[in-house]
Amino acid sequence: MKRTALTVAFLVFLSALLATVALMPETRGMTLYVGGGGPGNYTSIYLAVEDASPRSTVFVYSGTYYSHLTINKPLTLIGENMDTTVIDGGRYGDVIYISSDWVNVTGFTIRKGGWNSFDAGVELNGVQHCHIYGNNVSDNGNIGILLDYSDNNTISGNTVSLSVYGLYISDSRHNTVTDNYVSSNSMHSIYLNDCKYHLIDGNVVSSSGDVGILLHGSVDNTITHNEIMDNHGRGIVLDSSYGNTIRGNTLEGNEGDATREQFLSLLSVLLTTFFVIVGVLSAVLLLTLLILKRRRMTLGEDQSSKVERQSK
């Protein structure tokens, strides 16, 4: 009798546990769809992001979506095709504002962010472990991609163009910026302000209105294997920055940089000047030696004459 009662109690407990698990919301692996022709698909990226549980995926079919997104949970946002899946911010504010760790965004054209200070196509604020990759972030007013107080994120394989600043990274640590095409921004293409331990590698940085890559108040960053070309200012500028590693970059056609021909011409002038100075100094030294020798000879003759007079 006692065994039967225990069995019944266990079965009741197990049934209650299974019912509780069944009622728990799914937090991993859910995929929500925006656009397309599927039944139940969302028509708004904003609503899909709002409804998505943490660590879900929002897949967006091709189309132009006029929206501003705030992503405040771990989420993966995927566009069907970078060229035909467009998020348009209508020229105000951030187009995508990310305030959560572990957010991935790929496969979009992100355009028409605002012109106010720190408006951006994509802004990461106070986050870690986000990956922004394979997007066309262009024509965004003030900033293409902004990282502010954000660490350990990756920005890779994006086209970032036609803004005031291409990539603007401030007060951040340990971010990786690789294999991006950053071009035709009216100020600096990549700007690090008060940053440490960043890797800037394998990017093409071209046709900036000013400096290609500018570091201000930044230390211990690594800038390697970038192609920095045809910028209207210098290719790389370090302002109040130290301890940075700069290696293996190609700099060509930047207005503030010396070209190879200019460098060789300057070297030729310096070498010519050096040899002229050496020649002049050698001539002066030789003349001085001759004068000293002449004086010694004169003194010797005078002493000889004096000795002869005394002997007489």
Image (spheres, helix red, strand yellow):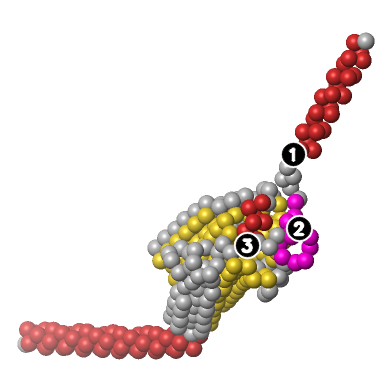
Tell me the residue that label 2 is attached to: 40
Per the model, the C-alpha gap separating discs 1 and 2 is 22 Å
Q: Which residues are magenta?
A: 30-41
Residues under numbered marks 1 and 2 in contact, where contact means CB atoms less than 8 Å apart: no
Residue 55 visible in the displayed image: yes
Q: Main secondary structure of the magenta part?
A: loop
Q: Which residue is mark 1?
A: 24
In this picture, residue 12 sits left or right of residue 242: right
Which is nearer the eye, 113 or 303? 113
- Nearest to the observer: residue 260 or residue 48: 48
Question: Which image quadrant is residue 181 in?
Answer: bottom right
Between disc 1 and disc 3, whose residue precedes? 1
**Quadrant of the image for the N terminus?**
top right
Which quadrant would the C terminus be assigned to in this image? Answer: bottom left
Q: Which residue is mark 3?
A: 132
The question of residue 107 being in magenta is answered with: no
